[in-house]
Amino acid sequence: MDTSLTIDRRAPSARPADAARVRAQDIADDKAMLRTAAELTRDLNAPRPWIYWSDLIASVVVGFGALAAAILLAPTGWAIAAGVVAVLALYRAESFIHELTHFKHASLPGFRFGWNALAGIPLLVPSFMYEGVHNLHHARTRYGTADDPEYLPLALMKPYTLPLFVLAAFLAPVALLVRFAILSPLSAVFPGMRKLVVERYSALSINPSFRRRAPEGAARTQWLWQEAGASVWAIALLTMVATGIVPLRAFLIFLAVASSVAVINQVRTLVAHLWENEGEVMTVTAQYLDTVNVPPPALLPMLWAPVGLRYHALHHLLPGVPYHALGEAHRRISAALDAQSPYHKASYPGLPGLVMKIARSTMGAR
């Protein structure tokens, strides 16, 4: 669901002067880097089912178990501690939606259904909201352009853009409840509303101009059962709250946890790219340099960028490598390429510096 706000773009004359910033269209592909990355990782492309399933199940069990503890525990301190654990574990479970868009489903039979049943539908983010959308972000000629559903030149926008960007995520759980409990049933009755819901409210995107196409074939089948499941769950949840079966306090704690998950993911999104492209088609190397790795020795990225998202730039270079193999891929490529290779220029030490970098860029407006 597009939970972004319509964000004003700064006029070119008002953009901060940055002589050091190289225009994206002037960056040629580094063929040595691309060739080395492909050759050194050919044996890493197969996903390991036992890793996916055990990681997902553990994250779900810990996440919902901690959520139950946050609701049931009387001491405030323990309830807050359980809530923090719930946020981090459910964020990790939810992050598998990214993996679903990349691997061939035949290589992990039943995983899409399992993820939707265990995490996607309970958290109101079924995979149809991302499948068929995220792949457009990886399209060679779409990345960073107006046709990319997951890109805005945030670093070149006005300073108030960043807090609004995060605020939109805070409100996402309520928006998703409205989407599935109200808009889904109404759109099933009114065709005109259905077109609006499909185009505007059926994608986890950040580009407010993105309009989604109606699904066809197998994708339509997946969409319909997932949307029906999420709709039934959203209506049931609100009904149980209204009738007192689910206490209001428990519901508010659930919303707080879900909002915290969305906010952490939005902050991660904020630093996943440099967001400096102004709509030009970019080479693969330029796309890589506009994206961010936060490799070891940094430890906190395993929490705020889980399931391989700490290697986001490498993922854009090699989208077919499963999350559990990205660390090994990074080690191999880093060792093989000299210090002057563009590969090393996409690595950053941590979250604070990345947030400050984009904040300073937006502060250039006068």
Image (spheres, helix red, strand yellow):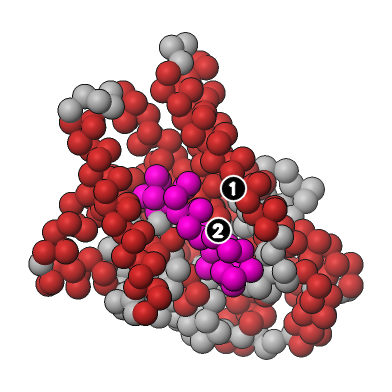
Q: Nearer the viewer, mark 1 or mark 2?
A: 2
Which of the image's four quarters has the N terminus? Answer: bottom left
Is residue 205 rendered magenta in the image? no
Quarter of the figure with residue 126 = bottom left
Q: Residue 44: horizontal and vertical position, in percent? A: 77, 69
Q: Which residue is mark 1?
A: 56
Which of the image's four quarters has the C terminus? Answer: bottom left
Instruction: Identify the residue at horizontal 23%, vertical 32% (top origin).
Output: 240
Is residue 108 rendered magenta in the image? yes
Secondary element type, mark 1: helix
Q: Callout 2: 10 Å neighbours few (<14), some, many (20+)?
A: some
Instruction: Identify the residue at horizontal 67%, vertical 80% (top origin).
Output: 285
User: Mark 1–mark 2 contact, CB under 8 Å?
Assistant: yes
In this picture, is 160 found above or below 46? above
In the displayed structure, does residue 348 sit left or right of residue 190? Answer: right
Q: CA distance from mark 1 to mark 2?
A: 10 Å
Residue stretch in magenta:
97-125
In the displayed structure, does residue 175 sit left or right of residue 67? Answer: left
Q: For residue 151, say whether it is visible.
A: no
Q: Residue 77: horizontal and vertical position, in percent? A: 51, 16
- The residue nearer to you, when weighing 119 against 162, is 119
Instruction: Identify the residue at horizontal 47%, vertical 43% (top origin).
Output: 261
Instruction: Identify the residue at horizontal 67%, vertical 42% (top origin).
Output: 300
Question: Can you name the residue that lies furthest to the front here?
Answer: 109
Q: Residue 321: horizontal and vertical position, in percent? A: 69, 69
In this picture, is 244 found above or below 307? above
Q: Which residue is mark 2?
A: 111
Q: Callout 1: 10 Å neighbours few (<14), some, many (20+)?
A: many
- Of the residues shown, which amino acid type is indicated by label 2? Phe
In the image, which disc is placed on residue 112?
none
